[in-house]
Structures are given as C-alpha cells and as structure tokens.
Image (cartoon, rainbow, N blue to C red):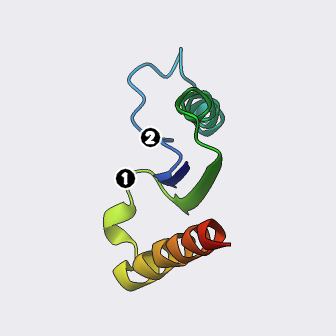
Amino acid sequence: MVCVTATRGELGVTDPQRWPPEQLPTIREAELAECLRILGVTEHHWLGYPDGGCDSADADAAVERIAGILRAVTSGLRS
C-alpha cells in the first residue's frame, strides 16, 4: 500500500505550550508514521509542500510529481 502526503502538518497549533511550533513537523511525522504502520502502508512519499500552502503550489508541477509516483508504483506492480 502506498500513501502520498502533501504537507507535514506543521501549522494549526491551538496550544503552543503543549505543541511547540518548532517541534510540530517532527511530531506530525511520527504521528503519521504510526498511522501508516497501523494501516499497513509500506511505501510513503512526501511532496514537501508547506502546510497551508498547497493552493499556491504550481498545479502542473504537482500533477507531474504525483503522476511520476503513480508511474513508479504501477511499474513496480507489473514487474
């Protein structure tokens, strides 16, 4: 199973004392890794867009990146 994630979720802190913003990317990555493990995801790709910034990403470049991942995944399935 494969998952593609656009951002690391580094924004959206409602309690900066409990969830220090500078530590949030690391916290979110660990949370996601555990969720993916539980779900049985064996391959994960980060697109690396800033949280809250997907709407400003170049759409053509984003589509090409995702299409490249899809091509790689499906070609691996056919081998």
For disc 2, the marked residue is 11
> Type of residue at label 1?
Gly
Identify residue type, mark 2.
Leu
Disc 1 or 2, which lies upstream in sequence? 2
The foreground one among 29 and 13 is: 29
Within the image, what quadrant is residue 61 found in? bottom left
Circle 2 crowding by C-alpha within 10 Å: few under 14, some 14–19, many from 20:
some
Q: Residue at x 64, y 31 (%)?
A: 30
Residue 26 vs residue 78, the one in the foreground: 78
Which residue is drawn at the image coordinates 35% and 79% (left, top)?
A: 59
Residue situated furthest top in the rendering: 18
> Given contact means CB atoms under 8 Å apart, are the residues at marks 1 and 2 in contact?
yes
Q: Is residue 18 above or below residue 79?
A: above
Q: Secondary structure at mark 1?
A: loop
Percent x, y of residue 6: 47, 56
Q: Quadrant of the C terminus?
A: bottom right
What's the mark number on residue 52? Answer: 1
Question: Is 6 left, or right, of 20 in this rendering?
Answer: left
The residue lying at 47 percent from left, 77 percent from top is 67
Residue located farthest toward the left when viewing the structure as drawn: 55
Label 1 vs label 2: CA separation?
A: 7 Å
Label 2's element?
Answer: loop
Q: Which residue is pictured at 53% across the width and 16% down the height?
A: 17
Q: Indicate the position of residue 7 as horizontal and vertical percent values.
A: 49, 52
As drawn, 9 above or below 23: below
